[in-house]
Amino acid sequence: MLDNILNILFPQSCPVCNERASDHEIAPICPECWLTIQPHNGPQCGRCGRPLVSDASGTCGECLKHEPAFKCAKSFGLYEGALKKAVNLFKYHNVRRLSLPLSAVMLQNDLPRVEAVIPVPLFKKRLRHRGFNQSALLAGHIAARLGAELMIDHLVKIRDTLPQVGLSSPERRRNIRNAFRIRECGKVSGKRVLLVDDVITTGATIRECSRVLKRAGAGDIYMRALAYSVMD
């Protein structure tokens, strides 16, 4: 009944198919398009989750050359179609209610038992501009579901960085190097940690965050994201 009332008062068209969005929780994405949000089952790196052309090796070249500090990173799907639309609406158009159904999408992946859930932080200037950290909203729902401690202010970004897209692998590492730090290292020491982000683009950011967490004494580090961008 609530959906019917909201549809009358605030009718919305799905940005994917232009049909009426009938479910307020996932609007403006319509239920039919939401069902097209499916996990990526193609070949991917067993360590960082990067989509691969084939599964001959099971590990990407970047992980073979530079072993990440995290044990395993996975994204639910690819950054395309309805999933991309939903992420962009949530992230750039302030449709914050999508954080709950999008976190439910992430929870379809097997999640490890952890003691702390930590979102990838934004630099303070970008946080002020956007008004919220989309990864923190996702992390909040996931932490509640896992019964783990949500640590929002322990991993912080201390300087702004250039966009990673278009940079070479060495340039990405230099760009993001020392951009993060840990407050109160003792809070993460020895804890199994789940790092949460919305989209993995190059993987350099989650590698650096994991490196900083491990240096602060964190135990096993896992990473989960909604989508992996195939732009890289």
Image (tube, grey):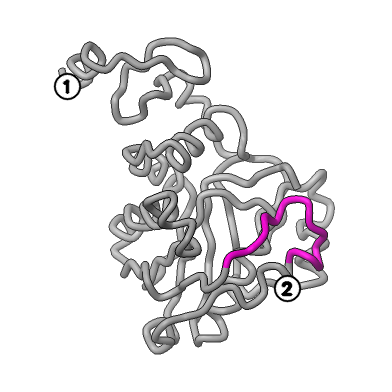
Residue displayed at 39% across by 57% down: 136
Quarter of the rendering occupied by the N terminus: top left
- The quadrant holding residue 70 is bottom right
Q: Residues within 10 Å of mark 1 (few under 14, many from 20)?
A: few
Residue range (magenta): 160-172
Label 2 and label 1: CA atoms lie apart by: 50 Å
Residue displayed at 42% across by 24% down: 29
Q: Residues within 10 Å of mark 2 (few under 14, many from 20)?
A: few
Q: Does residue 46 appear to the left or right of 182 in the view shown?
A: right
Q: Height in image: 188 above or below 57? A: below
Does the magenta segment cover residue 128?
no
Q: Which residue is mark 2?
A: 67
Relative to the observer, which residue lies in front, 20 or 49? 20
The rendered magenta stretch, by its main secondary structure, is classed as loop
Query: Residue 228: which numbered mark, if any?
Result: none
**Residue type for callout 1:** Leu
Q: Does residue 157 appear to the left or right of 43 in the view shown?
A: left
Q: Which residue is mark 1?
A: 2
> Can residue 120 be spotted in the picture?
no
